[in-house]
Amino acid sequence: MQEINNTLVVVGVQWGDEGKGKMTDYLGQKADVVVRYQGGNNAGHTITFGGNKYALQSIPSGVFNPHIKNVMANGMVINPKAAIGELEGLKQRGITDFQLFISDRAAVIMPYHIELDGAYEALKGGKQIGTTKKGIGPAYCDKYSRVGIRIGDLIDPEYFAERLRDALTQKNVELRALGLEEMDFDTLYKEFLAYGEVLRPYICDTSILLNKEIEEGKKVLFEGAQGVMLCIENGTYPFVTSSSPTAASVPLGAGVAPRYINRALGICKAYTTRVGAGPFPTELEGELADYIRERGHEYGTVTGRPRRVGYLDAVGLRHACRISGINYLSIMLFDVLTGVETLKICTGYELDGKVIDYVPATLSALERCKPIYIEMEGWKEEIEDVRDFDALPAAAKAYLRKIEELTNTEIAVVSVGPDRTQTIMIKDIDTISTR
Ligand code: IMP
């Protein structure tokens, strides 16, 4: 059997927004294919190069390189209008030469999903999840209740009519019950057939394409959105997204064999952030939180919401590394921590008088967890121009070594600024992706 060592999964190991866009873009320069395999336009991947900043939501990060095949695979939920808008935005900024492939099996986010996302949140009273209101949860629900529309349906007019009629029969009952306006078949039908025509050149069976690329030895990078702590299976349920951003969901979400996935790079901020509600044991408030938020520009790419900020949580990181089989970590936004006098890292939780070193399953237990910290000395020097690990201040090196020790995972990359060039490579990335 052919040995596969040319795939790499990029996984966020916290609550999303770890800087996966920068790393995927960076690694993507050497990749042949970049694949999104879950989530939708709830993600916000920011990429900075040549003095320009680009924010992508559903389009894979390899789109800036004309040699890269960009795949939106079957595990995604795709809002066609938003995806077309993103493509238009890129074209207006001169990004016209790209290769894009959209799975005919990917789920479509329909306008009623967006309406229902907002309505379900409103019904939760004070217990809102704080979703991005992009219709992600309701679209995945429909997929699993077998009333979902798929991208391939949009270019098969008769079949699409049948699917949409079935879906609307059910959805209009729900909308009515929630006091919302019913949706009109003809309007939706025309609108979405038109999107199908725009997307037609990109729509194909991406599983066939991906398996061929992998078997030919091409370098394939799988770009996770969100982070392991937002995983529907292993995250801080119910305050999670509706898909699994782990490496484990790549085979299903991209239609490739599990044995083709054997390496994962965990993307981890040097501290922790979270948007939306839900437990966050190491959350900070006050001056230090504001300092980190401002230096790290911690405001949501998709929603603009200020992000909650906290110390690094090694308990959460160990959980994420275990679940996703992380081989190496990439520490992001490391420069943000310059000037913090004392840094803390959470090494365990105190739960009901006992010390635990794992993330408990129930929300009520996690809410009762009190972080146990170790303290580390900070550094004052700005490090954004450092390109070599040895040139970092001693305290900064010690902080990184401590992360490795606490997570039992080697650090391969340290990011010291948003630009592609502001990157310290400790391990040659090629030895990670094509070992
Ligand atoms: P949804 O994915 O819109 O359903 O939102 C569910 C939860 O996931 C909310 O707490 C969101 O803030 C969070 N979330 C979804 N996508 C992202 C992301 O890309 N970064 C960070 N948080 C996210």
Image (spheres, helix red, strand yellow):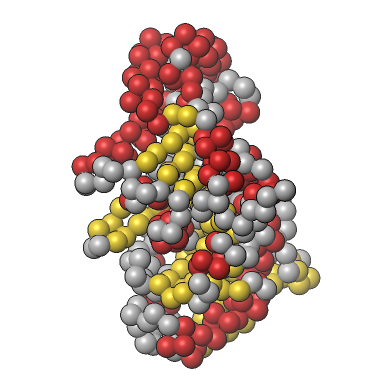
Task: State the residue in front, 233 or 265.
Answer: 265
Q: Quadrant of residue 373?
A: bottom right
Q: Looking at the image, is 348 positioned above or below residue 218?
A: below
Place of residue 348 in the rendered image (x, y in percent of width and height, measured from the top left): 69, 72
- Name of the residue lying farthest toward the bottom: 394
Place of residue 182 in the rendered image (x, y in percent of width and height, measured from the top left): 44, 15
Residue 239 visible in the snapshot? no
Q: Looking at the image, is 151 positioned above or below residue 128?
A: above
Place of residue 196 in the rendered image (x, y in percent of width and height, measured from the top left): 39, 22
Please give the name of the residue rendered at 21% of the width and 42% of the height, measured from the top-left corner.
92
Please give the name of the residue rendered at 26% of the width and 46% of the height, measured from the top-left corner.
95
Please give the name of the residue rendered at 36% of the width and 72% of the height, measured from the top-left corner.
422
On screen, residue 104 versus residue 422, left or right, reads right
Place of residue 29 in the rendered image (x, y in percent of width and height, measured from the top left): 40, 58
Please give the name of the residue rendered at 43% of the width and 36% of the height, measured from the top-left corner.
101
Task: State the residue in front, 337 or 76.
Answer: 76
Q: Looking at the image, is 174 positioned above or below residue 202?
A: above
Task: State the residue in front, 157 or 377.
Answer: 157
User: Which image quarter is the C terminus in?
Assistant: bottom right
Task: State the residue in front, 366 or 432.
Answer: 432
Residue 157 visible in the snapshot? yes
- Name of the residue lying farthest toward the right: 354
